[in-house]
Image: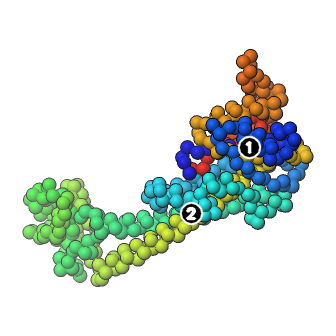
Amino acid sequence: MSKNTKFLLLSLPASISPTNDHDEALTALRSAVTTDYGTVFPFPIPEFKIGTLDALVQQADELAKLETACEGVVGKVGDSLKTILEGDEEKVSQSKTVNDKPAEQYLKSFHWNRVKYRADKPLGELINTLQKEITSIDNQVKDKYNSYNQVKTNLTALQRRQTGNLTTKSLANIVSPDLIIRDSDYLETHLIAVPRTIIKDFLRIYETLAPMVVPRSAVQVAADEEFTLYAVTTFKKHSQDFVHKCRESKWTPRDYKYKEGGREEENKELEKVGKDEKRVWGEALRLGRTAWGEAVMAWVHVLALRVFVETVLRYGLPLNFVCGLVRTTGKLAKKAKASLDVSYSYLGGNAFGRDKKGRVTKDDSSTSADMQAAGHMGDGGDYSAYVCYEFEIR
């Protein structure tokens, strides 16, 4: 789906057609929008069980909040997919499908899912079902991606220990056990990573850095582009002082204890965590793909309910309305709505008028408070003469 694509979900009374015919009303809607500003697709919404007026007003408010939550979850799942696919926009786009088809195609051919959301259920029950579903999707994705991030962090730390410089990398594959004094009551071996630029200073002063450093005990163990690793022997009772003075001299003491089989153990752990990372990566990707589609589906059904509730509040009973989906762009959306205002401003009664040049004007000051109190304000608090919700799926 193009990043610039926007949708307008509209509902108007069938009376916009002289015959009150649904199909003719849809044709009239297409004429009002015109192909210059967008393409109109039918968006069938079933009739639901209606409660009291007070209940409808409350449900309108609940649906507005739920739609915001759905949009947020869709965005978060999309961000998770982008992270796990390392920002590859093409792969991310391929992963964003609804019922195994692009989201735009799903919208264009939308039909209420009567199996998952039974239309014969009360509105309150449907809202509750959708609320639980979107919360469950959010929690599942969050838990799985937290697990993946934890495994990835562990793997990165292990890899850094294999590939970093001599101040951070594992010494199990570097230090020979013969260099380490073990089982001595008095002596201890220290491994010190010294910047290559100050090796001469190290060799000149290390013996006098602290009391009871064994003379000429410094042995080069390994070197990389930045550091050289030395083994130095001291008496145990002055070890802490020696280590402290090393840090003051900008040398890095390495905390290393020789362990029999430590090298093999580290390699096995790296292999195991690497396999875990691949497994959890696959699970997170599969869940992300499924969850994104399910979240979009829930969002669109919430939008459909918003349109239905607002239609009842606006146009009253008996219900006879036409619902259409306008595919447009960010730039053309305002023009499409302006064109609709020209054709259907009369539906707003006193809220709309015309200036001396015949252009449609809104009397916002006289209507906003009343409309908002009645639950008739559109997104962003902008009242229109017809039911209209603008959205985009990223």
Q: Residue at x 24, y 64 (%)?
A: 166
Q: Residue at x 75, y 37 (%)?
A: 377
Image coordinates for residue 129, horizontal then vertical, percent: 75, 60
In this rendering, position of residue 122 left or right of residue 148? right
Kindly identify which residue carries mark 1: 10
The answer to whether mark 2 and mark 1 are in CB contact below 8 A is no
Q: Answer whether residue 388 is visible to the viewer in this image.
A: no
Instruction: Name the amino acid type tagged 2.
Output: Arg
Kindly identify which residue carries mark 2: 289
Question: For this rendering, which residue is in front, 27 or 134?
Answer: 27
Against 108, residue 224 (above or below) is below
Q: Residue at x 80, y 62 (%)?
A: 118
In this rendering, position of residue 328 left or right of residue 369? left
Image coordinates for residue 35, horizontal then vertical, percent: 65, 39
Disc 1 crowd, CA 10 A, few/some/many (<14, 14-19, 20+)? many
In primary-sequence order, the first of circles 2 and 1 is 1
Question: For this rendering, which residue is in front, 35 or 394?
Answer: 35
